[in-house]
């Protein structure tokens, strides 16, 4: 069964401050942060995997659905908490959808943007995961 790591970030004070530090709260230096917003329920994002990039995804407002596929198993997750993040530490096909109108999806990334790290075709992703099967063991 596919196992993913979920991080529960600490919430501080009366205003619910959530601070996330690289190599402390997530297991990598944070080199890129981006967010997706202003989507509607029909919008779909993702449709790719990464060869080496590691990420933590979380909804800082609203919610969305996340389908993950490691080439052998598929899992559907709802992201709906500003202090719970899903860690993706190996090649994983992802599709993001069913955004609430107020959803803001935040992504913390281990590397700067690099187009050559993307796998944008699902069949190529399956070939890649079979070729790299022993390099990327299941998440702990």
Image: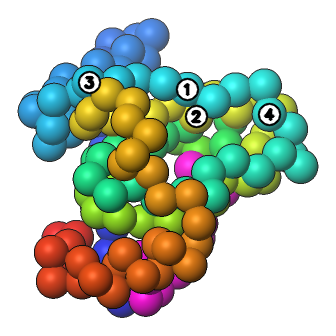
User: Mark 3 or 4, which is nearer the eye?
Assistant: 3
User: Can residue 44 be spotted in the picture?
Assistant: yes
Whichever of labels 3 and 2 marks the residue nearer the N terminus, that label is 3
The reply to whether dot 2 and dot 4 touch (C-beta < 8 Å) is: no
Q: Which mark is residue 35?
A: 1
Instruction: State how far apart marks 2 and 1 are (Cα).
Output: 5 Å
Q: Secondary structure at mark 2?
A: strand
The reply to whether dot 3 and dot 4 touch (C-beta < 8 Å) is: no
- Residue 37 position, x and y percent, is 70, 26
Q: Secondary structure at mark 1?
A: strand
> Position of 111 compared to 75: left or right?
left
User: Mark 3 or 1, which is nearer the eye?
Assistant: 3
The one nearer the camera, 84 or 29, is 29
The reply to whether dot 3 and dot 1 touch (C-beta < 8 Å) is: no
The residue tagged 3 is 31
The one nearer the camera, 12 or 124, is 124
Q: Which mark is residue 105?
A: 2
Instruction: State how far apart marks 2 and 4 are (Cα).
Output: 10 Å
- The span shown in magenta is 65-79
The residue tagged 4 is 39
Instruction: State how far apart marks 3 and 1 are (Cα).
Output: 14 Å
Q: Secondary structure at mark 4?
A: loop
User: Can residue 20 be spotted in the picture?
Assistant: no
Instruction: State how far apart marks 3 and 2 are (Cα).
Output: 17 Å
Instruction: State how far apart marks 4 and 1 are (Cα).
Output: 11 Å
> Position of 18 compared to 136: left or right?
right
Residue pictured at 49% horizontal, 24% vertical: 34
The reply to whether dot 2 and dot 1 touch (C-beta < 8 Å) is: yes
């Amino acid at each position: 069964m596919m196992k993913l790591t979920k991080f529960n970030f600490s919430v501080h004070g009366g205003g619910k401050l959530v601070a996330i530090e690289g190599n402390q709260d997530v297991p990598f230096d944070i080199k890129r942060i981006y967010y997706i917003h202003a989507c509607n329920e029909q919008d779909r994002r993702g449709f790719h995997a990464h060869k080496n990039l590691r990420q933590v995804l979380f909804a800082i407002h609203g919610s969305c659905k996340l389908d993950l596929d490691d080439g052998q198993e598929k899992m559907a997750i709802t992201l709906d908490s500003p202090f719970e993040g899903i860690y993706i530490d190996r090649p994983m096909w992802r599709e993001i959808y069913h955004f609430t109108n107020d959803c803001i999806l935040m992504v913390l990334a281990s590397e700067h943007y690099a187009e050559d790290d993307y796998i944008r075709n699902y069949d190529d992703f399956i070939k890649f995961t079979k070729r790299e099967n022993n390099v990327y063991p299941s998440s702990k």
